[in-house]
Image (cartoon, grey):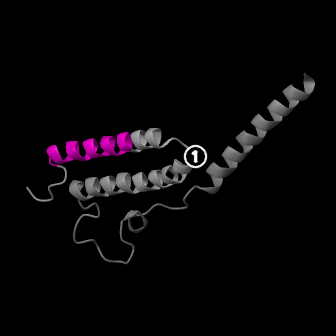
């Protein structure tokens, strides 16, 4: 019991010392206007540094990732075709593709795939 309590207290003390050390090391020396500005080249920015992001581009990128992951999931399924029953394999892969097509149809109906309105 003594070993457990001593190792627990040692680990807590070590964690607290590391947290205090990290906070003292990471302090910035001096915060001034030039260091806090988005551009440090000496010129004032002509426009806002936070430009708006196109939500349509983001949604198209997410859809691309979904279908890219679909291919990564389907490749091992093709390799397992030799080891499983053909009817069960066909049913599994068909359900997987039907679910993805229904999701794409839902996105299409909501107008996500239309770039300009």
Residue 100 on the magenta segment: yes
Task: Say if residue 103 shows up in the picture.
Answer: yes
- Residue 65 place in picture, x, y as percent: 37, 55
The quarter holding residue 4 reads: top right
Find numbered disc 1 in the image and state the secondary structure of the residue it sits on: loop
Q: In the image as oriented, which residue stretches furthest toward the top? A: 1
Residue 107 on the magenta segment: yes
Residue positioned 31% across, 77% down in the render: 43
Quadrant location of the C terminus?
Answer: bottom left
Count of numbered labels shown in the rendering: 1
| Magenta-drawn stretch, dominant element (helix, strand or loop) | helix
Magenta residues span 94-111
Residue positioned 53% across, 54% down in the render: 79
Residue positioned 54% across, 43% down in the render: 84
Quadrant location of the N terminus?
Answer: top right
Crowding at mark 1 (Cα within 10 Å: few <14, some 14-19, many 20+): few
In this orientation, which residue lies closer to the viewer: 75 or 110?
Answer: 75
> Residue at label 1?
83
In this orientation, which residue lies closer to the viewer: 54 or 6?
Answer: 54
């Amino acid at each position: 019991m003594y070993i457990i309590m001593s190792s627990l207290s040692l680990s807590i003390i070590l964690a607290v010392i590391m947290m205090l050390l990290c906070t003292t090391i990471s302090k910035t020396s001096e915060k001034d206007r030039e260091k806090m500005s988005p551009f440090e080249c000496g010129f004032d920015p002509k426009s806002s540094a936070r430009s708006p992001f196109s939500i349509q581009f983001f949604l198209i990128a997410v859809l691309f990732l979904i279908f890219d992951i679909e291919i990564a999931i389907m490749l091992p399924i093709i390799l397992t075709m030799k080891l499983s029953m053909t009817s069960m394999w066909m049913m599994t892969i068909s359900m997987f593709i039907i679910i993805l097509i229904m999701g794409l149809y839902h996105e299409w109906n909501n107008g996500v795939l239309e770039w300009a309105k």
